[in-house]
Amino acid sequence: MTEFQPLRMDRSQPCRVGPQDQQWQAATQAPIRRWQLEREAPESGQVTSLVEYLPGAHFPVHRHPAGEEILVLDGVFSDQSGDYPAGSYLRSPAGSEHAPFSAPGCLIFVKLNQFAADDQATVRLTPASVAAEPFCAGVTGRLLHCYGAEQTWLLDCEAGAVLHWPGVAGGELLVVSGELDEAGRSHAAHSWLRDTRLSELGLSATMPSQLLLKLGALRGLEEDPQ
């Protein structure tokens, strides 16, 4: 048996993962499949992934020892707290548990065990829950969560808009829809970028695009707020 090796866990190193790199893996617990973007350990630790629930999938009750963060990308994600359509954002703090399911099927972006130690907020936001505000030229944003130095934004970019922001340069970005250009390199929908110089890269939207942007949350680096 091949010994497990952590996947992209050196957060000082830039990462670019796109649809061309997809490696879906079936889960034994439910009719779902996962595409892992980074993983610390085989059955524990920090994980970032895309997860697809097939129609009618039910996941057993399970606990999140250090929190779970979800953005619903497509379909409807459900648990005992309600039904959440595409665009919904959920945070469940350390020690919480649920039994998620999806009647029509769904695709979600998931981060496990990456909360600041004392961040105990439970968040359930639907697409219309948060008002948009200017972020930078050609970009509006919805601030989904803020704790200490950590910020999570859902950004809507006009075609041609260039991403920039003040403060810490490092961050993590998921292309929810549309496409970004990075010095001639295209990043299509469901591409994931992580870089300590993210704000300095001159990323631009080649078409109207939606992005999930996380700042101040590159766990394991010196600027980590934990």
Image: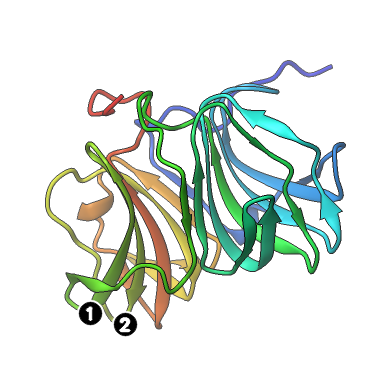
Amino acid carrying label 1: it is: Gly
Give the answer, above or below, for where 109 lies relative to 44. Answer: below
Q: How many marks?
A: 2
Q: Is residue 147 above or below residue 180?
A: above
Q: Are marks 2 and 1 in contact (CB under 8 Å)?
A: yes
Of labels 2 and 1, earlier in sequence is 1
Residue to which mark 2 is pinned:
158
Any mark on residue 42, and which? none
Q: Against 23, is 129 above or below?
A: below
Q: Residues within 10 Å of mark 2 (few under 14, many from 20)?
A: some
Identify the image's colour scheme: rainbow, by chain, secondary structure or one colour: rainbow
Of the pair 149 and 60, the residue shown nearer to us: 60
Quick check: can you spot residue 123?
yes
Mark 1 crowd level (few <14, some 14–19, many ≥20, 10 Å Cα): some
Q: Name which residue lies at 84% across and 16% down.
A: 1
Task: Give residue 161's quadrant in the image.
Answer: bottom left
Residue 72 at x, y percent in the picture? 58, 61
Q: Residue at x 22, y 38 (%)?
A: 149
On residue 138, which mark appears?
Answer: 1
* Relative side of 102 to 200, left or right: right
Alpha-carbon distance for marks 2 and 1? 5 Å
- Extreme-front residue of the structure: 81
Quarter location, residue 55: bottom right
Element at label 1: loop
Which quadrant would the C terminus be assigned to in this image?
Answer: top left
Image point 47% across, 76% down: which residue? Answer: 178
Question: Is residue 226 or residue 90 the one in the foreground?
Answer: 90
Element under disc 2: loop
Residue 171 in percent (x, y) is at: 32, 45
Left or right: where 104 falls relative to 78: right
The x, y position of residue 75, in whole percent, is: 68, 69
